[in-house]
Amino acid sequence: MTTSPEGSDQVALEPPSEVTEALPPSGEETSLTVLDPTTGEVLDLSSPNETLGAWLSEAREWKSRLGEAVRMVEAELNRRMDTDCSWTLHAEGMDIQGSAPGRTTYDAEELDAGLAVLEEKKLISPKARRAAVEQVTTLKLRKSGVNALLKIEGEVSELVRSLEKPDPKPRRVSVKVKP
């Protein structure tokens, strides 16, 4: 976070954690301002909803166009590196690294099945197989199932509620521009 000469806090769009960490709890006013990276102008977060909504819509469009521009520049740099058959470019004050062409990947389940056959034939060890493919078990939360459990009064809903935690993901806002 940077402080302007006038003393008001200004936050650039990156990294977003600076903006969200500096915001007061929901419902409280803020004197925090955001610096618009496209114009350099300050956006006052106490502006009307229409102003903030329009800015958010434009910023998302800008982010989309910026993403496309980044992909185009990356493609050009990769083309140059491919032409030189060198995936590190040395420029003044920086090294630019890219990925060599022809990268491949594997379907983990297919590879594991093939390695199991090789392990059975004693062509590779179990250790070699585990080094190439790791079995990972994860649990996925199903909100509809949790909500159903919360409807059962007594010990079931009490246990589920006791395990409830604040969602760490930042809240999103959707903007639909009317014609």
Image: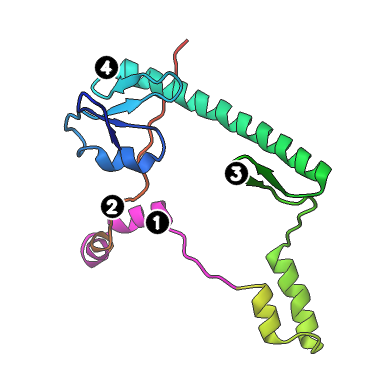
Q: Please tell me whether mark 3 sits on a helix, a strand or a loop.
A: strand
Q: Earlier in the sequence, mark 1 or mark 4?
A: 4
Q: Farthest bottom residue?
A: 122
Residue 138's place in the image compared with 73, above or below, is below
Question: Which label sits in the foreground, 1 or 4?
Answer: 4
Q: CA distance from mark 2 to mark 3?
A: 42 Å
Question: Which label sits in the foreground, 3 or 4?
Answer: 3
What's the amino acid at mark 4? Pro
- The picture places residue 93, in percent across and down from the top left corner, at 58, 42
Residue holding disc 3: 94
**Which labelled disc corresponds to residue 166?**
2
Is residue 143 covered in magenta?
yes
The residue at 45%/25% (across/down) is 59
The answer to whether 93 appears left or right of 51 in the picture is right
Q: Farthest left residue?
A: 28
The answer to whether 49 appears left or right of 143 in the picture is left
Q: CA distance from mark 3 to mark 4?
A: 43 Å
Q: CA distance from mark 1 to mark 4?
A: 39 Å
The residue at 51%/29% (across/down) is 63
Q: Please tell me whether mark 4 sits on a helix, a strand or a loop.
A: loop
Viewer-proximal residue among 135 and 100: 100
The magenta segment is 135-159
Q: Earlier in the sequence, mark 3 or mark 4?
A: 4
Residue 15's place in the image compared with 40, above or below, is below
Q: Residues within 10 Å of mark 1 (few under 14, many from 20)?
A: few
The answer to whether 72 appears left or right of 6 in the picture is right
- The picture places residue 5, in percent across and down from the top left corner, at 23, 25
Residue holding disc 1: 145
